[in-house]
Image: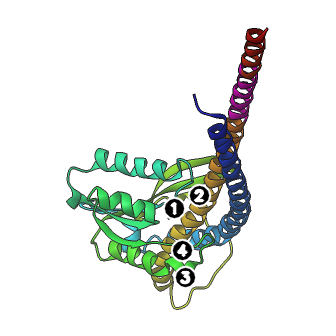
Amino acid sequence: MASLRDIKKRIDSTKKTRKITSAMQLVSASKMNKAEQNAKGYVPYSEKMQEVVANIANSNPDVSHPMLEKRKVKKTGYLIITSDRGLVGAYNSHVLKLLQQTIQERHQSPDEYTVIVLGRKGYDYCRKRDIPITNSILGIADHPQFSDIKDLAKEAVQLYSDEEIDELNIIYNHYVSAISQKPTINKLLPIENLHEHNGTTADYEYEPNQEEILKVLLPLYAESLIFGALLDGKASEHAASMTAMRSATDNAGELIDDLTLTYNRARQAAITQQITEISGGAAALE
């Protein structure tokens, strides 16, 4: 059995840990609130972009673009969004598990797919398992700007335009609420289901013409979807971190209670033993 001094040291150490995790919980909560605002604030722009693209595509059947056309899938690209740090619960494992399951179900050889990675955890995971990586960004800010991933997003879209890949999917954690994040896989390219969006009813005049406008808007639209998913993923990351730190704080509190009870029992047993020894010694002197 551990000595009273050892138990007291564990109690003090656990109390210090609880202070740290409690502070980290507050920091994550603050970051989550801002990240949630960023994600929600970006939605109107993304929806407006989709609205205009759908308006052009649906109003003129003769307008075409390679990003709207399906082709035989010989190679697939996966863009995954993970964190750069740990202490975020199952946030990373959910994304990486979905990636691994998708690869196992759809592909027979590494030549059939490639991965674009946002976040060190995803990069390390893919590298250790020899999953082919085309591009990556590590050390993404807690509240990223579009300029942070502009080049990577542009290159990802260009891979499809150059027919180096025939399909581009994005895998990330969709933010549902502070306590719920859903691992999600969405097809980015080719762009599909635009017919489901009627687009704006406003009468626009396009200059020089709709096809030229579409050539500019479609890559921007695909890049905006990538950035929107990143903002969504960052909100999920901070929410997962907050939940993990809250759970760690609660567990530390329970451990302190258990150790305190153990300490009191051991202390009482030591006192009882001392009293017994004193009584025995006094009885022997009589």
Q: Which residue is mark 1?
A: 83
Span colored in magenta: 257-273
First of labels 4, 2 by sequence position: 4
At 52% from the left and 62% from the top, the residue drawn is 85
Q: Main secondary structure of the magenta part?
A: helix
The C terminus, quarter of image: top right
Q: Which residue is mark 2?
A: 237
Spatial CA span between label 1 and label 2: 7 Å
Q: Are marks 1 and 2 in contact (CB under 8 Å)?
A: yes
At 47% from the left and 66% from the top, the residue drawn is 119
Examine the rendered structure and indicate whether residue 12 appears above or below residue 42.
above
Q: Amino acid at mark 4?
A: Ile
User: What secondary structure is marked by label 2?
Assistant: helix
Spatial CA span between label 1 and label 4: 37 Å
Of 81 and 201, nearer the camera is 81
Q: Judge whether residue 258 is colored magenta.
A: yes
Spatial CA span between label 1 and label 3: 18 Å
Q: Residue 233 falls in which quadrant of the image?
A: bottom right
Q: Which mark is residue 147?
A: 3
Q: Which residue is mark 4?
A: 56
Q: Amino acid at mark 3?
A: Ser
Q: Residue 191 falls in which quadrant of the image?
A: bottom left
Q: Amino acid at mark 2?
A: Glu
First of labels 1, 2 by sequence position: 1
